[in-house]
Amino acid sequence: ADILQARGQFDEAIRIYQEEVLPIFQKLGDVRSVAVIQGKIADILQARGQLTEALRIYREEELPVYQKLGDLRELAVSQSKIAGILQVRGQLDEALRIHQEEVLPIFQKLGDVRLVAIAQGQIAGILQVRGQLDEALRIHREEELPVYQKLGDVYSVAVAQGQIAEILQARGQPDEALRIYQKDVLPIFQKLGDVYSVAVALGKIADILQASGQLDEAMHILQEEELPVYQKLGDVRSVAVAQGKIAGILQVRGQLDEALRIYQEEVLPIFQKLGDVRSVAIAQGKIADIRQVRGQLDEAMCIYQEDVLPIFQKLGDVRSVAIIQDRIADILKAQSSSDE
């Protein structure tokens, strides 16, 4: 089930956990193992965008067991997962509070420098989303990266360097971000033989090239170096994400028909099959964007109002709700101008 989950085959993985594994531990009365499996089920639900149910399991099925057992480490890990969902839902203040007040102090008390570094990285991630780029960058560089370097954890060093590059890109330093990916991140994953992480790093490089207007080179990387890896690994989720990025470039180039076809035929069906409601909403939003650009305002409005907005509202994602409401307002304004 773990392997299937890693490959993006969530339906079969969750079936195994629920039907083949969990009942045995429940029958044995092994409460710790039951909690562990419940957590794995919640992990899959979270990956599929079923955040409400994942959050319920973490809070009601997993966390209380570790509290009762007095297992501080697993308690903190569970709290961290809860914070992760809150972050995705746009509840950044509460997510940050949990990391800073519930998670980090436990790892510090346990003296686990690796978990402390991981928690610091998660805090930096929230600060980055909040636009506090300088502080996020400082944490990655001064609190997180040195720990992995001291531990000799080259994989985590590369991941942290990638996060630093993301912030530099957001700060308008694409050249330095690109240099880090090409010199400090990609070579490590290549040396480790981690083909998946190599593909992810190449995708990040493609993102920077696309943002800087180098569309042909970005498209080449996506189509020739990133997408084939995910296809070979059978990672259907990553395939859909890469296809979505290809469609995004086509959209920028004005090739709206092909971009629309990819979103509708290559991207949306995969997320629907995976049951990933968040990604379904995002894909539907991309389709609506193209409809809007093509002047198909009624169709775009219908998608935003019926297929996108309700999902983000249900997920409690206030940030995305605000964005979609702005798009709807733009269409209403355009329709009003057209009527006049």
Image: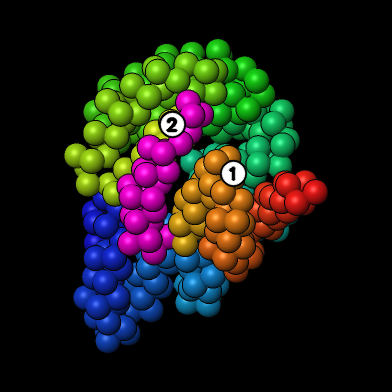
Numbered label attached to residue 295: 1
Is 272 one of the magenta-colored residues? yes
User: Which residue is labeled 2 in the image?
Assistant: 255
Q: Is residue 210 left or right of residue 233?
A: right
Q: Which mark is residue 160?
A: none
Closer to the camera: disc 2 or disc 1? Answer: 1
**Closer to the camera, 93 or 273?**
273
Along the line of sight, the residue nearer the viewer: 112 or 137: 137
Where residue 153 appears, as percent x and y from the top left, is 40, 31
Kind of residue sitting beneath label 1:
Gly
Alpha carbon distance from label 2 to label 1:
15 Å
Residue 260 within the segment the image draws in magenta: yes
Who is closer to the viewer here, 179 or 256? 256
Q: Does residue 286 appear anywhere in the picture?
A: yes
Residue 301, compared with residue 287, is above or below; it is below
* Residue furthest right in the image: 340
Residue at horizontal 27 percent and vertical 47 percent from the top? 235
Q: Residue at x 61, y 62 (%)?
A: 305
In the image, the segment drawn in magenta is: 251-276
Q: At 73% from the left edge and 47% from the top edge, which residue is drawn?
A: 338
